[in-house]
Image (tube, grey):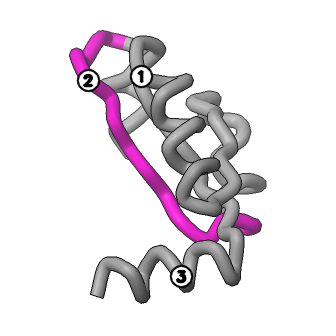
Amino acid sequence: MFGNCLENIRKTTPLVHNITNYVTVNDVANILLACGGSPIMSDEPEDVADITSICGGLNINIGTLNKRSIVFLTP
């Protein structure tokens, strides 16, 4: 099953929006690239609508919450 998922990722090369903490940003991007995905890293509220409209996936890894990230995640 995992092999099929990985094969599908490599065939489609989805653009994945990543909202991640700064400690793991490079690791997350490199893992997605190694799996065959295409990462885009942005946590700017102004970018959400544009990025969401073109992405095939979303990864949220906030880590330790702070005032800025809580405001960003609150509708």
Residue at image position (42%, 81%) is: 5
> Under tag 3, what secondary structure?
helix
Q: Which residue is mark 1?
A: 24
Between 30 and 18, which is closer to the camera in this rendering? Answer: 30
> Under tag 2, what secondary structure?
loop
Q: Quadrant of residue 66?
A: top left
x and y, in percent, of residue 9 in the image: 57, 75
Badge 2 amino acid: Gly
Q: Which residues are magenta?
A: 53-67
Q: Which residue is mark 2?
A: 63
Q: Which residue is mark 3?
A: 7
Label 2 crowd bin: few (<14), some (14–19), many (20+), radius 10 Å? few
x and y, in percent, of residue 52 in the image: 65, 60
Q: Nearer the viewer, mark 2 or mark 1?
A: 1
Badge 1 amino acid: Thr
Residue at image position (54%, 59%) is: 35
Label 1 crowd bin: few (<14), some (14–19), many (20+), radius 10 Å? few
